[in-house]
């Protein structure tokens, strides 16, 4: 019999048991360090720059990018003249982010950090941003509280979160059908619901605006290769496949290929999909 996945063992006890919580955190870190997320992130890099361009960012601002990955938000923020810090649990992604910043002669402080326990004093940043990152932390209420804590009064927290109804939400649902998370593991895509986001930030004293956005993600290969691409490079997908036997892996690949093909708006030898996300702007009171 296969051992239970790390998240099934850890999540139930993590709230009150620091040992189990650490195990949960280490499992998540290993998941995001698996593969090479930088290969995946480059397909949404342009959207990261668009996201930053819509925010009230001015030169000289102190900006924090939480779950920064390879720097898709941190780098355009630094280009705009901000003083930028980026944190992530995956140290290999921080190395890629540093290399990208160095290639553009940008000074960005990339360091290890957890969205649920940010290593900064209260009110350290004018703008706190996160794109498709902090939404995956296991304790969302704590994430909202931490994002608000490190934001200065009058400052803004800006998130980009995949929606349950959008393409990525559907993709996560396919995986969850075959590798179901425990009942008490909050679905990351709940961050893509307006009512949930407003409730979470209201508890931290923030007012919230939301906007639904769509990004066209274009892969220069067909649906079958896209599925294999994520299996090779996206750590959480690798972990999901590792929990299945050969028949289960084939079923997951077939279901995902069907989903990608059904949503393809490009030519048959490429894959262009519209992916919806919720843009969240939470303002901390003065």
Image: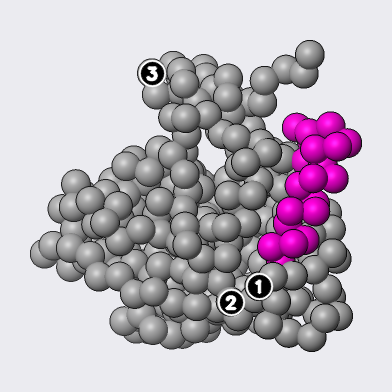
Foreground: 284 or 195? 195
Contact check, label 1 and label 2, Cβ < 8 Å:
yes
**Residue matched to label 2:** 274
Q: Residue at x 58, y 45 (%)?
A: 89
The residue sitting at the top extreme is 1
Quadrant in the picture for residue 130: bottom left
Residue 146: x percent and y percent?
33, 47
Q: Which residues are magenta?
A: 241-260
Residue 196: x percent and y percent?
30, 52
Q: Considering only vertical position in the picture, is 71 above or below 7?
A: below
**Residue matched to label 1:** 263
Residue 161: x percent and y percent?
45, 62
Estimate how packed mark 3 is, as few (under 14), some (14 to 19) or many (20 or more) residues with alpha carbons within 10 Å.
Answer: few
Question: For this view, does 250 lie left or right of residue 202?
Answer: right
Foreground: 217 or 166? 166
Q: How is the image coloured?
A: one colour
Q: Residue at x 70, y 76 (%)?
A: 264
**Residue matched to label 3:** 16
Mark 3 or 2 closer to N-term?
3
Give the label on residue 123, or none.
none
């Amino acid at each position: 019999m296969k051992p239970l996945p790390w998240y099934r063992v850890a999540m139930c006890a993590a709230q009150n048991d620091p040992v189990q919580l650490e195990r949960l955190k280490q499992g998540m870190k290993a998941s995001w360090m698996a593969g090479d997320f930088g290969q995946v992130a480059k397909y949404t890099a342009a959207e990261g720059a668009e996201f930053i361009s819509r925010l009230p960012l001015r030169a000289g601002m102190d900006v924090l990018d939480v779950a920064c990955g390879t720097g898709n938000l941190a780098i355009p923020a630094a280009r705009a003249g901000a003083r930028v810090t980026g944190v992530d649990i995956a140290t290999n992604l921080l190395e890629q982010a540093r290399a990208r910043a160095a290639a553009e002669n940008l000074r960005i402080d990339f360091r290890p950090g957890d969205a649920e326990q940010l290593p900064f004093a209260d009110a350290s940043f004018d703008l706190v941003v996160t794109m498709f990152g902090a939404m995956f932390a296991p304790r969302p209420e704590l994430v909202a509280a931490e994002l608000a804590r490190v934001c200065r009064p009058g400052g803004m927290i800006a998130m980009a979160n995949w929606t349950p109804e959008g393409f990525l939400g559907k993709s996560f649902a396919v995986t969850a059908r075959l590798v179901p998370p425990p009942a008490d593991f909050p679905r990351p895509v709940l961050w893509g619901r307006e009512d949930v986001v407003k409730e979470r930030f209201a508890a931290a004293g923030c007012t919230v605006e939301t906007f639904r956005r769509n990004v066209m993600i274009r892969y220069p290969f067909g649906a079958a290769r896209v599925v294999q691409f994520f299996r090779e490079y996206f750590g959480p997908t690798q972990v999901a496949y590792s929990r299945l036997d050969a028949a289960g892996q084939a079923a997951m690949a077939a279901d995902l290929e069907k989903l990608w093909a059904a949503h393809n708006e490009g030519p048959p030898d490429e894959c262009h999909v519209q992916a919806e996300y919720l843009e969240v702007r939470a303002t901390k009171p003065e």
